[in-house]
Image (cartoon, grey):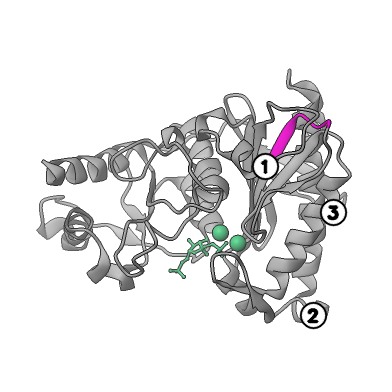
């Protein structure tokens, strides 16, 4: 049996990275415990305020954010944090050598209905050690991430993590309180017949995305010549977890529903960490024309279209978009 602690000790990794991962995953245990109590823990419903992106915050969005923030402020390796729920980057320890970015509670609309939610995190190097961080310090390419992962609070609590090359998966043992390794090398098959998209936005998508989904729905009667199946968890963590377990394609594509949004998901603390996990497991991750991990960020809260999962399917979506551009 390999626990997360054993795994982190056995890896030739920078001890600081191991330390911040331990802090985040320890808080994951506390969030999982709150979710287990559910309605009995006063964690459901609205917090009564909006985040910087104009979204209503749920009580648990705020709570999970504060728990992670407080814990990382105590970790001397953490120079600062950026979160979906914080307008700007927040300093932690001036001498820290790492930046931690997180979506404290992913899939907020699932909280009140007792469905799967998660926490997504990303670790970046900090180049100006000793000086106070600014938002711009976080604007690094996704391929610079030193580690990335998520916690899925589902029927059991699971952790997917990538530090150097492989993606590893752990399950939280409720008896011992340890994360126990359940998959030492997660791999995604290149082909799939399963896809995830919120189809209610169909009329707002670009023509190539409409064409792609039309082809999947036509199934064996259309150009794809076989049937496809839809799944939608409404929490990216849940959809990505399914893809790491059995392949598939997940997309939150570009849409014209809101003029100021390039897509719904956030580059720095949703798309980048998930793209690193997916690529390291042999899959692909694109904004429909370019690799997500190579996008130059301009804002810690910037949004990006996301297409990720089984490699051949992701490539096909990209080809349709590039053909359309001419
Ligand atoms: O409400 P929709 O359109 O189904 O969107 C669901 C998507 O929004 C998200 O919930 C956004 O994340 P947050 O809950 O952290 O804002 C994704 O996890 C999920 O894929
Ligand atoms: Mg999210
Ligand atoms: Mg969130």
Q: Nearer the viewer, mark 2 or mark 3?
A: 3
User: Could you say where residue 248 lies in the image, as x and y percent from the top left?
Assistant: 39, 49
The residue singled out by tag 1 in the image is: 134
Residue found at x 68% / y 49%: 89
**Among numbered discs 2 and 1, the one appearing first in the sequence:** 2
Q: Nearer the viewer, mark 1 or mark 3?
A: 1
The alpha-carbon separation of the residues under discs 2 and 3 comes to 20 Å
Q: Label for residue 70?
A: 3
Rendered view: 41 above or below 223? below
Tell me the element at label 3. helix
State whether residue 40 appears in this view: yes
Estimate the x, y position of residue 178 in percent, counting from the top left.
Answer: 83, 45
Look at the picture and state if 322 lies above or below 206: above
Residue 264 at x, y percent in the picture: 43, 61
Q: Earlier in the sequence, mark 2 or mark 3?
A: 2
The part of the image, by quadrant, that contains residue 17 is: top right
Q: Let me know if residue 3 appears in the view.
A: no
Disc 2: which residue: 42
105 with respect to 41 (left or right): left
The span picked out in magenta is 95-99
């Amino acid at each position: 049996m390999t626990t997360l602690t054993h795994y982190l000790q056995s890896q030739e990794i920078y001890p600081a990275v191991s330390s911040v991962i331990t802090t985040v995953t320890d808080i994951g245990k506390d969030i999982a415990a709150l979710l287990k109590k559910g309605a009995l823990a006063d964690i459901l419903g609205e917090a009564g305020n909006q985040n910087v992106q104009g979204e209503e915050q749920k009580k648990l969005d705020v709570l999970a954010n504060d728990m992670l923030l407080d814990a990382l402020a105590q970790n001397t390796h953490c120079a600062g944090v950026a979160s979906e729920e914080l307008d700007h980057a927040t300093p932690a320890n001036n001498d820290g050598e790492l930046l931690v970015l997180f979506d404290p509670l992913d899939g907020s609309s699932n909280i009140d209905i007792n469905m799967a939610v998660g926490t997504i995190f990303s670790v970046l190097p900090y180049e100006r050690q000793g000086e106070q961080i600014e938002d711009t310090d976080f604007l690094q390419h996704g391929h610079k991430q030193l580690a990335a992962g998520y916690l899925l609070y589902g029927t059991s609590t699971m952790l997917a993590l990538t530090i150097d090359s492989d993606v590893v998966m752990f399950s939280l043992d409720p008896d011992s309180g340890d994360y126990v390794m359940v998959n030492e090398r997660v791999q995604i098959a290149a082909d799939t017949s399963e896809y995830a998209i919120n189809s209610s936005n169909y009329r707002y998508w670009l023509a190539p995305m409409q064409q792609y989904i039309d082809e999947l729905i036509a199934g064996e009667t259309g150009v794809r010549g076989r049937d496809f199946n839809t799944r939608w968890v409404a929490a990216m963590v849940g959809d990505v977890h399914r893809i790491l377990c059995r392949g598939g394609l997940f997309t939150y594509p570009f849409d014209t529903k809101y003029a100021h949004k390039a897509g719904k998901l956030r580059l720095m603390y949703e798309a980048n960490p998930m793209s690193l996990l997916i690529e390291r497991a042999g899959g692909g991750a694109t904004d429909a024309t370019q690799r997500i991990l190579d996008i130059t960020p301009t804002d810690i809260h910037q949004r990006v279209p996301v297409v990720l999962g089984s490699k051949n399917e992701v490539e096909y979506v990209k080809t349709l978009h590039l053909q359309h551009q001419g």
